[in-house]
Image (cartoon, grey):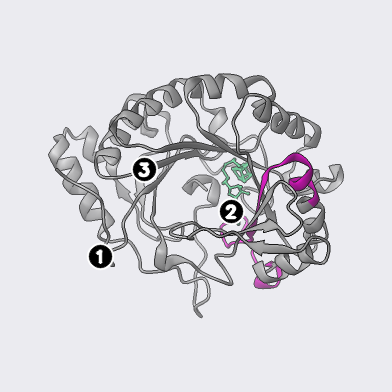
Amino acid sequence: MPGPLRDSYNRPIRDLRVSLTDRCNFRCFYCLPHGEPPMAEKEQVLSYEEIEYVCDIFTELGIEKIRLTGGEPMMRRDIEQIIFKLAQLKDKGLKDLALTTNGYFLPHRAHSLKEAGLDRITISLDSLKRDVFKQMTGVDVLDRVMEGIAAAKEAGLDPIKINAVIVRGHNEDEVADFAAFAREHDVKMRFIEFMPLDSGHDWNREDVVSGREIRQRIEERFPLEPLDVARGSETSSRYRFVDGAPGEIGIIAPVTEPFCGACSRIRLTSDGQIRTCLFSTLEHSLRDVIRDGASRAETIDFIESVVMKKEPRHYINDPGFVTLSRSMSFIGG
Ligand code: SAM
Ligand code: SF4
């Protein structure tokens, strides 16, 4: 019986992020400011059958969490179909099936996602102000995303997580307002440090608002206390409000407080490349392996050998760090 997957540093690999597409209808300046690069040819993109097949193998290898992402995953046609198929893997050991989305398509689709078997949803929301939202995402659709959040809640996709990338000079003054939003709507806010994963290569260390500063800004209004849970491989440090208000705060600080030592993640791009780290400079074509007719056992050998190459850590803070040619939208955030 194969699995659980382990890398060469003995880290168990339990968490798979699957990008369904590198297309996106938003133009977030920290991700895809100038739109998509030339698209992968359609035939290079993994079909739903292929995604289902490899996810079945990954589950056999001990993957417990699958998160669908992109690009904007809801731009992939009939996403409910693949959710339905992947939800069946719960009989084989999958514990959690989640989706990260910009929320644009949720007002009409949140129910069908839930019905298809989605467990949890994370919705990106970078500002509560219409003009800042538009400036950060390139689209003037704050109201629609708010409707999407309400629809997800109504559909029972609880607990809802909200991702906000905090960037100096854009939205750091809204951090405490977001905490107020979490309390009011009983959602889990996730504040993310700006990482050098933007296709425009405009990332600047000075633009990073540190996790520490984010926490301070919240505590000026709402005192926090750490949640009494083991962090394990979680990316965020989690807090609750001291006054017992609903909602939760999570701070994801990969730049100023790297958590690589406990990383349990690998990624699969929409064109079927395994990436062992967000900042990998190498990709490994699982697509070619399965399309060249490898047996299931050979495919397992391939995945295990790729996982052994997982990097010990990222190198954002090293002198000579080179930004990647591929943005977060391609890699799958
Ligand atoms: N389109 C979906 C969305 O925006 O939620 C899913 C894909 S997106 C790449 C996943 C997450 O990555 C989003 O929450 C986004 O804010 C985050 N992200 C993108 N570029 C980033 C960057 N340069 N630094 C930090 N987070 C980033
Ligand atoms: Fe699109 Fe998500 Fe990237 Fe924004 S963060 S451009 S919504 S993929």
Q: Earlier in the sequence, mark 3 or mark 1?
A: 1
Mark 3, secondary structure of its residue: loop
Q: Give the residue at x 21% y 54%.
A: 305
Q: Which mark is residue 199?
A: 2
Q: Which mark is residue 64?
A: 3
Q: Earlier in the sequence, mark 2 or mark 1?
A: 1
Q: Relative to residue 261, is residue 277 depicted above or below?
A: above
Q: Earlier in the sequence, mark 3 or mark 2?
A: 3
Q: Quadrant of ligand 2?
A: top right
Mark 1, secondary structure of its residue: loop
Q: Which residues are magenta?
A: 180-208
Q: Estimate how packed mark 2 is, as few (under 14), some (14 to 19) or many (20 or more) residues with alpha carbons within 10 Å.
A: many
Q: Amino acid at mark 1?
A: Ser
Q: Amino acid at mark 2?
A: Ser
Give whichever of 200, 64 is nearer the camera: 64
- Is residue 148 something one can see in this rendering? yes
Marks 3 and 2, Cα distance to the nearest angstrom? 31 Å
Magenta run includes residue 185: yes
Residue occupied by mark 1: 8
Percent x, y of residue 171? 79, 57
Determine which quarter of the picture holds residue 159: top right
Q: Relative to residue 113, is residue 35 depicted above or below?
A: below
Q: Amino acid at mark 3?
A: Glu
Q: Is residue 43 left or right of residue 139?
A: left
Q: Is residue 191 left or right of residue 185?
A: left
Determine which quarter of the picture holds residue 2: top left
Q: Give the residue at x 51% y 69%.
A: 258
Q: Give the residue at x 67% y 39%.
A: 26
Q: Which mark is residue 232?
A: none
Percent x, y of residue 157? 59, 31
Give whichever of 190, 269 is nearer the camera: 190
